[in-house]
Image (tube, helix red, strand yellow):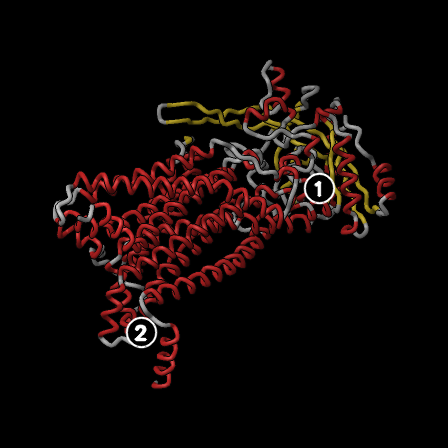
Amino acid sequence: MIALSQVNAALRRQNRKNYLLLVLCNFISVLLITAYVTMMRSPTVLQVLPEGGDSRKQVMMIFVLAVIGCGVFTTYAASLFFRSKARETGIFLALGATRQTLSRQMFRELAQLGIGSCALGALLGTPLAWLLWQGFRLLLVDSQEMAFAFDPQACLFALAFSLFTLAMLFWLGRRSLRRTNIIDIVNEARRSEPIRDVKRWYGPVGILLLAIGGLLGYQAPGFFILQLQWYPPEGFTAIFYLPALVGLYMILLHTVVNGWHQGKNRYKHLISTSMMRFQGRQTVRNMLVITVLLAGAYFASFYTPMLSAGNTLQVERRPYDYAYHYRADQELPGQGEVEQLAEEYGVTITGWKQQPMAVLAVDGEEHVEKEGPMGATWEAVYREQLHGDTFLSESAYRTLTGQDIQLEPGTVVGVFDDEGSSNGMMGNEISLVTNMVTGAQLEVTPVEPVLCYDLLFGCRVLDDGDYANITQGLTPQWQEQQVFFNVEDVDGTYDFAKALFNAIVDRSGPEVEVGDYYDLVEKAQAEAAGEPYAYDPQFVEEHGMEPIRYDQRDSSAFRVHWKYMPSFRVLDRADFVTTMAVFLMLFLFIAIVCFAAVLVIGYTRCLTIALNNRQVFEDLRRLGATPHYLYQVVRGQVSRVFFVPGLTGTTLIYAFYMLILYFNGDPLGFSAGELAGMGNCLLLVAALSLLLYGFYRFTLGHVCRMVGVDPASRKRDGRRLAAGK
């Protein structure tokens, strides 16, 4: 007598492809999520990404997209598995097996398959992240701060996703066993999921909703904070992106059901469109996941070309090769020492310029937060001494820049970047300037237009007489020196630049071992109130930021955030990749993970199309369909799985990125660096689109072989059709 376990083993061997597909999907999903979270939670990365910073928010946003995408993917794979397994369940029920027996048998199988695949993915996720990181270090850049560190808390995220996968498996398995009709169970694998009729207006309305949702979602945070003076709860503003999601779903529905072909051309795709409609729900879900993941992948991959283009343009347009500033109480190299050092390295200095500056307090409105029943709100409170700014006299500004300016007494003007943008970091609206040593005050009136000069960005300029009066009595702590000079053959002066940089750092005291967020006025106010200053070095780590340390002068934190970091053209150009290595590697890694998920999901969906429609292709062949026609039908389905999400996701994220850049501009518009960066992003899109197309061709060939379409026969048939025409 044959035991039930023997029958089950025989059926498993017969349907091993379905079991393998489930294991593979679970394994890949957990593997990708574990690798992502291992990288995201690494101390190497967290030290560079400050708590609450834009970069960390972007990483978390893409991680949420990846979790949602992989979660939907595993759910879809499990539903396919149970649909194929329904026939086995029906056979056992027909043989007299009880549901309780089948339940124990199924849950035992699911435990073995689910726990095994998830555990293997979780175990290999961290080694995968380490191998990719080491590959980046080997191929791109290697530095001291690039040493990869592992945080055991990352395992909790992997465990949570694995538990979700297992819970979803058991829930779907239990639901599949609750059916009472054996005929329904046996025919479950043949059941289609057609979509109801979709009107043609779904397409244009979906595009409109997509645009409206993207604009609303992006503008909502600013509206609540600036107009309503309310800080919405975390994630609340994401609700306003829902119209975009609905619009995207409508676009995909329209594509699957109606297509975008009009007139007589629509009949050429009648068979493939009809076949897609019968699997419509599954297809749209997968296309939606691919679109979202692809958008996240491009969002991460755009970071490098945008950053590199902006940095390159900014460095190259500087009017001086070397620029640095320092507090007057620091014994830093002066003109004589710098020229002597240059002589040692065979460098010729030209055009030396040096002028004094002063740190003065400016007035303004401070946003004071208040906790309320609906969340935090804020109100503007005027402060005569809000923070400190650096000031120059008009003659000093004229000497340093060569720009001819004439200011009236009692006026002040701000210095923005070369394109007239404040980058959201300063404004030209102040009315009171205070000497923090003597207490003297000067009422001023801002004048327009603002001055434009990258190397003095953030400074303010006063009339010579006003500057002399307000700066009387300032101690060296509140005074600075600004130095500009050029050199002959700047590209050959890297060693000199490195030596001068080290000399500046070595001779800087501990009192200036601070970040660019350190403010002398705020520090003085905290001391006067008997309170600790939040940005003193000993408190910086408590705010989730990496402190500035002279012994880590080559780290990203030091090079990007040291308050007195010099700007040397040759150094900034040559060390850019090293300086930004952690940022570049992190976003490159994220892009790879998301693209890998896109390829796996697209490939799996196309295999499902082949498995579900084998009989349909066989019927078409018996009705006289040529190999060329069958190939066109297969291509019509596979191309939609890849090209529609690819085109939608790429266009969507590129337009959204341009929206961000446009509204971040001040004044509104695109800077030259942003335009150059978006041009680089277009080249990246072209390269990745070619990669996606190559994978599509590989998948198309595999699906053709699965449904019995011979590529050679298809080509011969196509040539005969062309000759007949």
What amino acid is found at the position of numbered circle 2 in the picture?
Tyr
Above or below, comparing residue 213 to residue 632 in the picture: above
Say few, some or many: other residues with alpha carbon within 10 Å of mark 2 (under 14 / 14 to 19 / 20 or more): some
Residue 145 as seen in the image, left or right of residue 493: left
Q: Tell me the quadrant of the picture where the C terminus can be found.
A: bottom left
What amino acid is found at the position of numbered circle 1 in the picture?
Ser
Q: SS for tag 1?
A: strand
Image point (62%, 50%), residue name: 139
Q: Is residue 510 visible?
A: yes
Residue 179 locus on image (x, y percent): 15, 45
Above or below, comparing residue 612 to residue 71 in the picture: below
Distance between the alpha carbons at the discs numbered 2 and 1: 64 Å
Q: Are marks 2 and 1 in contact (CB under 8 Å)?
A: no
Please give the residue where the numbered disc 1 appears in the rendered image. Answer: 567
Residue 290 locus on image (x, y percent): 38, 52
Residue 568 locus on image (x, y percent): 73, 43
Say few, some or many: other residues with alpha carbon within 10 Å of mark 1 (under 14 / 14 to 19 / 20 or more): many
Label at residue 629: 2
Residue 220 as seen in the image, left or right of residue 415: left
Question: Where, by quadrant of the figure, is residue 723 drawn?
Answer: bottom left
| Mark 2 / mark 1, whichever is N-terminal | 1
Above or below, comparing residue 688 to residue 350 in the picture: below
**Outermost residue, top direction?**
530
Of 684 and 517, the residue lying toward us:
684
Of 119 and 308, the residue lying toward us:
119
**Outermost residue, front direction?**
1
Residue 656 locus on image (x, y percent): 45, 50
Q: Is residue 208 visible?
A: no
Report the label total: 2
